[in-house]
Image (cartoon, rainbow, N blue to C red):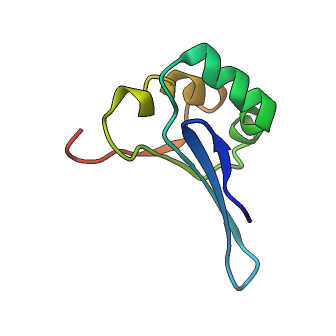
Amino acid sequence: GKPVLVTPATFVEIESMEGETTRYLFDTGWNYDWMDTCFKREGIDVMLADNKIDAFIQTHEHMDHYWGFPVVTKYNPNIHVYTPNTF
């Protein structure tokens, strides 16, 4: 698959040689309303709600990478979250 930029969040879909697909969402932006709009525009909201995204990965603790996190949990409160141990 190809990465989809949901500024500044990124959605990555990986297909293994066996045809198995894994999906990750990296970071979430600085503004709840903007990220909600972006997620709806790109279909990320539905993928989260349908458990089609395997994990959320927070790359680092800058506010423009995590203030939109409540939007992720709005659509999937049980998503697996990876956060750096320095956070």
Could you tell me if residue 74 is visible in this image? no
What is the residue that sits farthest to the left in this orientation? 86
In the displayed structure, would residue 40 be above or below residue 42? above
Taking the view exactly as shown, the residue that stands out farthest to the top is 33
Q: Position of residue 74 (x, y in %)?
A: 61, 22
Taking depth in this image into account, of 75 and 68 the one nearest to the observer is: 68
Find residue 32 and report its image quarter.
Answer: top right
Residue 35 seen in the current view: yes
Image x and y of residue 87, in percent? 24, 38
Q: Is residue 67 left or right of residue 83?
A: right
Give left or right: position of 45 versus 74: right
Q: Relative to residue 58, is residue 52 drawn left or right?
A: right
Which residue is depicted at the point 72% across and 38% down? 44
Q: Position of residue 41 (x, y in %)?
A: 80, 30
Residue at 22 percent across and 47 percent down: it is: 85
Q: Report the residue that reaches farthest toward the bottom.
A: 17
Q: In front here: 7 or 25?
A: 7
Identity of the residue drawn at 62% across and 25% down: 35
Task: Give the x, y percent position of residue 75.
Answer: 66, 28
Q: Foreground: 29 or 53?
A: 29
